[in-house]
Amino acid sequence: MDQIISIKPLLAVLVSLLIIPMLISSSDKPNVREGWTFTAGIIKFLIVASMLPLVLQGKEIVLTLFEIAPGASIAFKVDGLGMLFALVASSLWIVTSMYSIGYMRTLKEHGQTRFASFFALALSATIGVAFSANLLTLYLFYEILSLATYPLVVHHQDKKSKISGRRYLTFILGTSVAFVLPAMLYCYHVTGTLEFTTAGIFAPGQMSKPALTVLLLMFVFGFAKAGIMPFHSWLPAAMVAPTPVSALLHAVAVVKVGVFSIVRVLTGIFGVDLLAQFNLGIIVATIAAITILLSSCIAMSQDELKRRLAFSTISQLSYIIFGVALLTPMGLLGGVIHIAMHAFGKITLFFCAGAIYVATGKKYISQMKGLGKTMPITFAAFFIGALGVIGLPPSGGFYSKWYLLIGTLESEYKFLMAILLVSSFLNAFYFLPIVYQGFFSKSDEEPSNKAETSGATTIKEAPLWCVVPLVITAIISVVLFFYPDIFVNLVKIGLGL
């Protein structure tokens, strides 16, 4: 594959980092501060998008900053997989920044400058993970992201947030240091390299099946941002953070960095052929399947909307790992494009949850009867986001779920298709009733008879800065149903399908 040396990957990483001093210096001028955020967001997206044509032509954009040891360097590589993730993250940063203005200002949240600064740092780390050329670079940015998002999780600085923050760091940093770091060092000791390649880094006969199995499990559980059970409890606990942070955690950065890291390890360190040779895919697929079903069942019991969305996220992340672990062309395709399709659907759902809270102060599903009549735009967007997560048309999520189903039929374990069908039914069971009761149930606050009702239903949507972003992401989710080719092509190029 042709490689082109360019500074653009580094610029894409640095642009949001470089505006942090400007954000801090304009803390007493909110409009100026948000202007810097939007400027950096647009520049970051344009830099990423400018590399897209070359990647679609099958070229890789590379840049090595410095070598730490032979075969271990801090380096960037922009390929199909990295481009898909970077496009999603950089575009949604702009939309999430817009949403943050409406949410944070309406609720008069404190520390908005601190919030914006760490948000920017988190996006720099996310793009760094997306464009990492090797496991060492990925690990470095993975840990930077862990530290950058901690202040966002504990933003409210009350007792509950501090407890959740400690749990967040314990799981995220603890697992990566205990599992990923030694596994990475062992890989380097055995192979002398950490570079991602489609064939993997292990030579034939270099590792036994038991050793490979242990190494594989260390990576899968070590990247705890992916929310694999039993290392998942940090994720619902982190819901104490403001909704824009929840959206960042669940759709744009943190959890997607977790699954993306696992995808990189499975396809770029082990390689599909090696995993198939030793029949290791079914181990990872089984772990993912258990997480999918258990988290879906737990989601049904949650009355707080953000917690239901959190357990839904745990389930949906495992779809990605499940698809890649099938080791079939359609499974790989469905798993990786679900990174993008789920991102737009799930961020829409979180935006809607925040908009409902801003407009009404309600965060429990049992309190939301009839709200669709007063917030029709928000609940219509919620319906579209739910379709994307369930995997029904007209949403982009239909394609990833469809490819995953075909992937199970291509595999040796066709019974795994039942996991996808049952879990999709569960997705519908815990999302669609919210929409139904919003539009068709009678509100507890509604007058008991028509004689007490005067005039038409009053529309009370959240502020425009909250509503416009959720409309944008809902529309994009629908557009991806009709035009999924860009993400499909990037995955095929990135995985050599």
Image: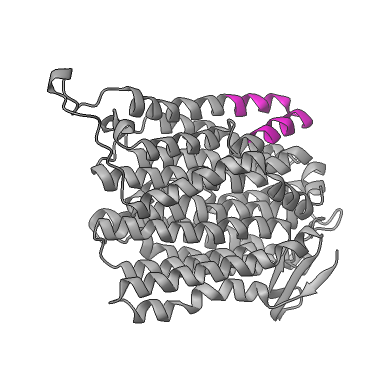
Q: Is residue 26 above or below residue 245?
A: below
Judge whether residue 185 can be spotted in this image: no
Extreme residue toward the front, this view: 455
Q: Which region shows up in magenta?
A: 401-421
In this rendered view, identify the residue nearer to me: 306 or 74.
306
Residue 109, how many percent across, how many down?
26, 61
Q: Is residue 207 above or below residue 353?
A: below
Residue 182, how many percent across, how many down?
61, 63
Q: Name which residue lies at 30% across and 22% down.
A: 441
Residue 29, how many percent across, how many down?
30, 76
Q: Residue 412 colored magenta?
A: yes
Q: Name which residue lies at 53% across and 67% down.
A: 42
Residue 77 placement: quadrant = bottom right
In this rendered view, identify the residue nearer to me: 233 or 151.
151
Q: Is residue 196 above or below residue 211?
A: below
Judge whether residue 275 can be spotted in this image: yes
Q: Residue 297 colored magenta?
A: no
Q: Quadrant of the N terminus?
A: bottom right
The count of marks equals 0
Residue 256, how many percent across, how many down?
55, 52
